[in-house]
Image: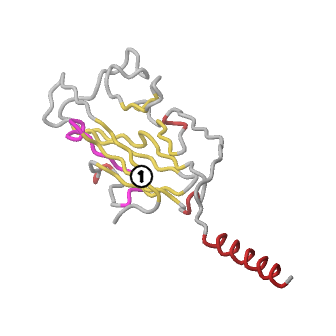
Amino acid sequence: MTKVLLLLMSVIVAVSLLGLGADFRSYDAQRNFAVAVVADDQEFIDLTPIQPYAYINTDGKIYFDFSRFNPNYPGGGKGVSPNTTYAFDQVFKVSNDLWENDSGYNGICVQVSASGNVARVLDLYSPDDVYGHTDPSNAADSVSMFIEGGNYSWVGFVINTNGYTAGNTIDGQITVVAHAGNCPE
């Protein structure tokens, strides 16, 4: 009986030791996943036109159009004057509609910049720019705004056509990049 009890105890100890030293191999589960692809003005970080120069096209993207092709001005103006500087407040806004404290942060840094040919005539400003580009007098080719959850910041444009003659067309890109946390110093 002692041998049986000793053998049983040895088996229990051996099984316990094997169980403690086992490595996890795999886990298999299926979960639902859904992503809605929506227009720029309906995103969690959304771009919403404020002025009629900005609009959401049928492809869901925001466009900035100061030409005769802007659908908000059928039969209206054809562009901006040569050798002139225009300042347009609140052309569009950027909203932070992410869930508050999602991933442990309380806000996002949004950087908006102009590139391509348009960067030669377009400067940006926002009253919330962390680098001081807060009005038309100190606009720059990019702005960076810290936006807390549930809030927004607007972006204005300065278009300077000095040196351009009537008939010129200037195209380019406006890039919007967002990341969690404060804007870099």
Please tell me whether residue 151 belongs to the stretch shown in magenta. no
From this view, report whether residue 101 is shown above or below residue 60. Answer: below
Q: Nearer the viewer, residue 136 or 57?
A: 57
Q: Which residue is drawn at 73% across and 79% down?
A: 10
Q: Which of 169 and 20 is in front in this view?
A: 20
From this view, report whether residue 150 is shown above or below residue 80. Answer: below
Q: Which residue is drawn at 36% across and 47% down?
A: 112
Q: In which quarter of the image is the C terminus?
A: bottom left
Furthest residue to the left? 163
Q: In which quarter of the image is residue 166?
A: top left
Please tell me whether residue 124 belongs to the stretch shown in magenta. yes
Q: In this view, does 55 lie to the left or right of 132?
A: right
Q: Can you give x and y, in whole percent of width and height, for residue 110 in the image?
A: 42, 52
Residue, disc 1: 110
Q: Can you give x and y, in whole percent of width and height, for residue 179 in the image?
A: 43, 54
Q: What element carries label 1?
A: strand
Q: Which residue is drawn at 56% across and 63% down?
A: 104
Q: In which quarter of the image is the N terminus?
A: bottom right
